[in-house]
């Protein structure tokens, strides 16, 4: 919550932008229920829409309500993330490192600045809850009871109905179980039922969304498969995230991507190698969750410039999935320091420095983001000489300035 507390005034300047105007327009013109159960592009996300519209109405149109809610979701994800890691036997250094980097990371600016983006956080929260209940039987060496299976089904369903890439969690768990099942003496029996319970909502949602997309014009774009564009985007997705944004100051190129991909492979491989036998299962789920997200992004965004591959909004899932693997190596290195007091001091300094390193850019970037994602639109709404037929406010061709002002007045947007 520190970014919000220390930059409270700047966060109050954010305002509705882009897809938010689209959703306001559709909700107002289509009718609430038709909008709620309609598609958002190629996405079917009624749970997210329900929460989003509820906050809009209960918050009286205040955009800052969305910002605060987004930070509260972020807080819950970070706490649950750490709890899950501790449950699987990760050391305190690994947990604190993973939590602090995720919690304080400046790349979360984009998710917190636009209300549509909290769909990511809602989905990750439900996915972690599903994974938590999946873990119960395995960690306690017992079959899952009916209540636990129902909870897994519910949380996974909520996750996929908040965010389209939430469908990845089911296949990630099942594929991990199948892969780990090939290792001799690797006990996965009590993880299988949880994997099936997670997979069912993901498959049903995937089929439903896929059938709808095939019947829409967007289906033509999806079927017109560009294998070269897909392969290129997938390579850069796997290579640039999350290290490109964390190292900073790098130029996107084939050589940079190749080096970062090699570094990612080394860090992931070493993390798996040093992980305890049991921890490799949860690490496998998180890693495949990251890979699955990269595949879907490469498929859906292959027409966009390569620069978009390392967009800030895509860093959250990369950090969530890969930080535990990176943290294991860090903890192993720190354990090489034999003197107890020296190891404690080195650990404290390293954790403080890394936390400060990922947090410091908030103050650098927030002023620009509040101008682009807030003040500019607020000023346009107040301009008396703005052409009513143009689209300066919403930046959507079918939402002219006159319509944007009508929506702003009707829903008291502020």
Image: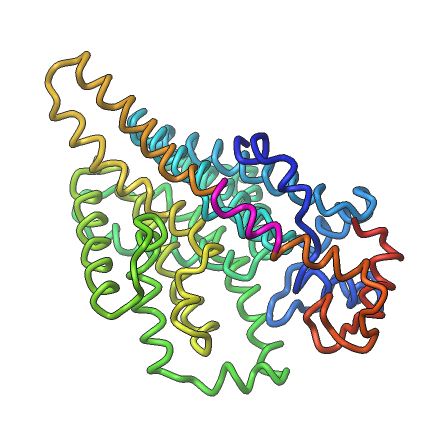
Residue in view at x 56 percent, y 37 percent: 147
- Drawn side of residue 303 relative to residue 182, left or right: right
Instruction: Indicate whether 140 appears above or below 192.
Output: above
Give the magenta-colored segment's residue range.
Answer: 363-371
User: Residue 58 versus residue 253: which sits nearer the camera?
Assistant: 253
Residue in view at x 51 percent, y 40 percent: 129
Residue in view at x 23 percent, y 58 percent: 260
**Residue 122 spot, x, y in % from top left:** 58, 47
Question: Can residue 141 be spotted in the picture?
Answer: no
- Drawn side of residue 371 relative to residue 253, left or right: right
**Residue 121 spot, x, y in % from top left:** 55, 47
**Residue 267 spot, x, y in % from top left:** 21, 47
Question: Can residue 15 be spotted in the picture?
Answer: yes
Quarter placement of the N terminus: top right
- Drawn side of residue 339 relative to residue 201, left or right: left
Classify residue 236 by image quadrant. bottom left
């Amino acid at each position: 919550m520190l970014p919000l507390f220390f930059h409270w005034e700047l966060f109050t300047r954010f305002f509705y932008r882009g897809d938010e105007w689209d959703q306001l327009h559709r909700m107002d013109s289509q009718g609430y229920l038709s909008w709620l159960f309609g598609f958002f592009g190629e996405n079917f996300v009624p749970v997210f829409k329900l929460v989003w519209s509820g906050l809009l109405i209960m918050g009286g149109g205040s955009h800052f309500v969305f910002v605060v809610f987004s930070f509260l979701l972020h807080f819950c994800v970070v706490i649950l993330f750490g709890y899950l890691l501790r449950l699987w036997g990760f050391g305190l250094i690994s947990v604190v490192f993973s939590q602090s980097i995720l919690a304080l990371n400046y790349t979360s600016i984009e998710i917190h600045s636009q209300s549509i983006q909290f769909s990511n956080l809602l989905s990750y929260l439900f996915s972690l809850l599903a994974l938590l209940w999946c873990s119960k039987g395995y960690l306690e060496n017992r079959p899952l009871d009916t209540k636990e299976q129902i909870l897994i089904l519910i949380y996974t369903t909520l996750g996929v109905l908040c965010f389209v890439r939430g469908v990845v969690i089911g296949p990630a768990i099942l594929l991990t179980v199948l892969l780990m099942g090939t290792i001799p003496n690797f006990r996965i029996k009590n993880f299988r039922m949880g994997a099936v319970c997670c997979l069912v909502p993901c498959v049903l949602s995937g089929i439903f969304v896929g059938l709808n997309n095939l019947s829409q014009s967007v289906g033509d774009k999806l079927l017109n498969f560009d294998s070269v564009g897909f392969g290129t985007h997938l390579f850069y997705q796997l290579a640039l995230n999350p290290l490109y944004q964390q190292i900073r100051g790098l130029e996107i190129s084939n050589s940079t991507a190749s080096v970062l991909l090699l570094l990612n492979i080394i860090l992931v491989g070493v993390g798996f190698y040093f992980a305890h036998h049991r921890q490799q299962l949860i690490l496998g789920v998180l890693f495949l969750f990251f890979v699955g997200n990269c595949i879907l992004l490469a498929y859906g965004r292959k027409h966009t410039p390569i620069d978009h591959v390392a967009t800030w909004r895509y860093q959250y899932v990369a950090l969530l999935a890969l930080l535990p693997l990176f943290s294991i190596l860090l903890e192993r290195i720190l354990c090489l320091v034999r003197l107890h007091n020296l190891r404690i001091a080195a650990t404290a300094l390293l954790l403080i420095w890394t936390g400060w390193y990922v947090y410091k850019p908030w103050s650098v970037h927030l002023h620009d983001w509040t101008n682009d994602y807030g003040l500019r639109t607020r000023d346009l709404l107040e301009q008396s000489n703005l052409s009513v037929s143009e689209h300066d406010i919403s930046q959507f061709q079918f939402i002219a300035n006159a319509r944007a002002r009508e929506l702003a007045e009707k829903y008291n947007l502020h």
